[in-house]
Image (spheres, rainbow, N blue to C red):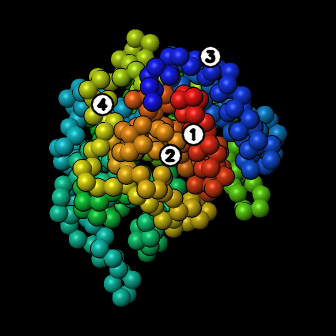
Amino acid sequence: MGYRRAINAARTVMGDGMQTTLDSILGRATEDGRLPGVVAAVVDRDGVAYEGAFGVRSLETGVVMSTDTVLRVASQTKSVVAVACLQAVEDGILNLDAPASETIPSLGDVEVLEGFDEAGAPILRSATTAMTLRHLLTHTSGSVYEFWNADCARWLEATGHPDFMSGRVATLDRPLAFDPGTDVAYGLGIDWAGRMLEEVTDRRLGEILADRVLGPLGMTDTGYAATPSMDERMASVHFHTGDEFLPVPSMDSDWEFESGGANLMSTVGDFCRFMSMVLGDGELDGERILRPETLAMACRNNIDDLQFIRETSTNPMVSNDFEYLPGVPKTWGLGWVVNEEAAPSCRSPGSVFGAVLFNSWFWIDRTVGVGGMLATQVLPYFHPDAWDLYGQFETSVYDHLTS
């Protein structure tokens, strides 16, 4: 298809034709009430090729959505924290394949939940494999979210253990769904990876990210705590009842820890800086974040023959069932999903992508040299209109690149 040639030759089309097309697609989604607000951007190796904002930050206030709107980026935190962990691997203070218990001893004692007896009591056994940092970064550790694992949800209810949304650090201490390295399921692995990073540096995770990733990349609107300026630009989260969107009263809580897998606030513009660094083989504007070989390792299959297929919701208030790109083989790199074959949009094999609980998605295609992000702030996750809009958005980008 001559992708690289198309990227270089089509900058004016990207600026004019793509702007018009994407503005139309995204604008209609808010004008007809399918979504309250949308922010989106596209980056290539020359920088930001498109950005747009449509609808409102809040249905209560009617404040217009803008490209600098601050968003809760939830699981996009995982990709940022994974990069910081890989920096520690490069520095020699973490090891991808050493037992994680060498850093956090309690991780050597985590048991596997086999099921429940006739009285409803959990049946637990010792794990047969040692958990590693690679397991934690690839969702093969067995530490799962209760939103997509019925046994984990039942265990929390049976034991009265705090759930993830409680923000209590004790929520991480839960049994595994399977022996590390034997299966793949979306979960809390990168929260534990963040704890490991804190342990070996004796620093808070937010400080590490600010010094090693966010600061060098110029991501000034990203952090676990909002500055006054960020607060002024914060979007509200809206819950879709099936008939209408209702503003969620408050998403703020007093978390006991800085989550490696959630809770960063950011803007689409800031995340464009992060995506540009990935497209730049680990470097942006002269700042080296990761070595090229480390980034390449992070962007390829790190789970061997396992496949990331489908997650089934246990809580329809939080998430619908979901599967990304049905029929396309998907594995995990270190901090993001890898599509092993071309996506229907024409996204290249070996691209990486990730998601946000509040119905935002991003992809980074290092083969072509393009990435993009579409962000909303709605629940439950995998809202059909939001996912469909993301598909239209990504497909339209590739249509312009190859026309």
Could you tell me the amino acid type at mark 2? Pro
Could you tell me the amino acid type at mark 1? Thr
Q: How crowded is the residue under tag 1: few (<14 C-alpha within 10 Å), some, or many (20+)?
A: some
Q: Which residue lies at the image location 50% right of the left edge and 31% below the top edge? A: 371
Question: Would you say the residues marked 4 and 3 are in contact, meaning their CB atoms lie under 8 Å apart?
Answer: no
Q: Secondary structure at mark 1?
A: helix
Q: Which mark, residue 344?
A: 2
Tell me, yes or no, if residue 204 can be seen here: no
Q: How crowded is the residue under tag 3: few (<14 C-alpha within 10 Å), some, or many (20+)?
A: few
Question: Would you say the residues marked 4 and 2 are in contact, meaning their CB atoms lie under 8 Å apart?
Answer: no
State the CA–CA distance, disc 4 to disc 2.
23 Å
Residue in the foreground of this view, choosing between 182 and 398: 398
Position in image of residue 97 (x %, y %):
19, 43
Residue placed under numbered mark 3 in the picture = 12
Query: Closer to the observer: label 1 or label 4?
Result: 1
Q: Where the C terminus falls, by quadrant?
A: top right
Residue placed under numbered mark 4 in the picture = 296
State the CA–CA distance, disc 4 to disc 3.
30 Å
Of labels 4 and 2, earlier in sequence is 4
Position in image of residue 113 (x %, y %):
31, 70
Residue 151: image quadrant is bottom left
Q: Which residue lies at the image location 35% right of the left edge and 80% below the top edge? A: 116
Could you tell me the amino acid type at mark 4? Ala
Q: Secondary structure at mark 2?
A: loop
Could you tell me the amino acid type at mark 3? Thr
Residue 171: image quadrant is bottom left
State the CA–CA distance, disc 2 to disc 3.
25 Å
Position in image of residue 155 (x %, y %):
41, 71
Q: Which residue lies at the image location 39% right of the left edge and 29% below the top edge? A: 367
Query: Closer to the observer: label 4 or label 3?
Result: 3
Q: Secondary structure at mark 4?
A: helix
Q: Secondary structure at mark 3?
A: helix
